[in-house]
Amino acid sequence: MESTPAAGPNDEPPSGHLEDVIALRVREFRLAKGISLAELARLTGMSKAMLSKIENAHTSCSLSSLARLAEALQVPVTALFRGVDAEREAVYTPAGHGAQIVRRGSNVGHLYQLLGALRGEHKRLEPLLVTLDEASEVFPLFQHAGTEFLYMLEGVMVYGHGEARYTMRVGDSLIFDGEGPHGPAELLETPVQFLTVTGFGHVV
C-alpha cells in the first residue's frame, strides 16, 4: 500500500475547475478504500501514469475513463464531480429582519416583509411574511404571474380567490393560481399573520 496520507479537512479544497475536482475526488475515494495506484490500475485497466496524471489534475478524463474509475471505486459517476460549481447563492434572513415592502394597503395596517430573494435567472420564489392587524380596513386584491402558496401562522381570516372564499385558521394552507384576483376578504381574529410563497417557474 502507498504511504500517501489520506485527504483530511485541512487539505486544499478543489478550485472548482473540473480537472481539479475530479483529481481530489478520485484520490479521496481511492485512499478511503485503501487502494494503491497499482491496484486501481489493475481494476480499471488504465496505466499508473495515467492515473497519476488524473489525480494531479494534469489531464482530462474521458467519459469511459470516468465510468471505469467509478466502477472500480464503487461510487456513482456523479460522485466524482462533487464540488463542481459548488458556489450557489443563498439568502439568510434572521427573524424580524425581512425587508419591509410597500404595497396597496400598507398604510392601513398591512405589513409585508420580504424574506429573501435570489437574483437573475434564479429568482423563482418570492417568500413574504404578511401581518394584518385590527387597523386594517382596506383589502386590496392582487393578481400576478405564478403559483402562490399560503400558510396561516396566527389569527383567523377569510381569504378570497376569484369568486371562492376560504376561512383560514392556524395551520391551514392554500395554493392557487396567482393570475386570479386574490387577497384577504375579512379578518375574524386579529392579528392575522401568514406566510406566502410565490413560485414563478422558469423564465423563458
Image (tube, helix red, strand yellow):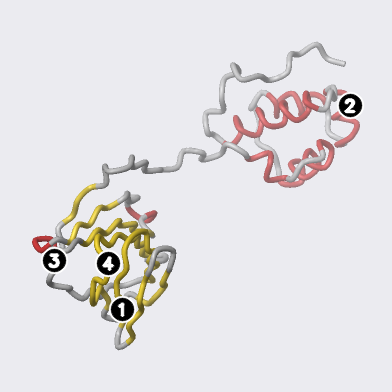
Q: Earlier in the sequence, mark 2 or mark 3?
A: 2
Q: Quadrant of the C terminus?
A: bottom left
Q: In the rendered structure, which amino acid carries the disc numbered 1?
A: Glu
x and y, in percent, of residue 141 in the image: 21, 76
Image location of residue 60, percent across then percent down: 65, 36
Q: Mark 3 sits on what residue?
A: 105
- Looking at marks 1 and 3 on the same chain, the residue that comes earlier in the sequence is marked by 3
Q: Position of residue 20 (x, y in %)?
A: 60, 30
For label 4, the SS is strand
> Of marks 1 and 2, which one's residue comes earlier in the chain?
2
Specify the label residue 179 is tagged with. 1
Q: Is residue 71 left or right of residue 172?
A: right
Real-space Cα separation, disc 4 to disc 1, in angstroms: 28 Å
Task: Label 3, secondary structure: give it.
Answer: loop
User: Badge 2: few (under 14), some or many (20 or more) residues near its Cα, within 10 Å?
Assistant: some
- Give whichever of discs 4 and 1 has the lower sequence position: 1
Please tell me how crowded label 3 is: few (under 14), some (14-19), or many (20+) other residues with Cα within 10 Å. some
Which quadrant of the structure image shows residue 88? top left
Indicate which label's residue lies in the foreground, 1 or 2: 1
- Quadrant position of residue 106: bottom left
Q: Which mark is residue 63?
A: none
Looking at the picture, does residue 163 appear above or below residue 169? below
Query: Quick one: 153 or 26, which is closer to the camera?
Result: 153
Q: Which residue is mark 4?
A: 189
Q: Is residue 48 left or right of residue 22?
A: right
Res 191 quadrant in image: bottom left
Q: Amino acid at mark 2?
A: Glu
Contact (Cβ within 8 Å) of mark 4 with mark 2: no
According to the picture, the residue beneath numbered tag 2 turns out to be: 39
Of labels 3 and 4, the one closer to you: 4
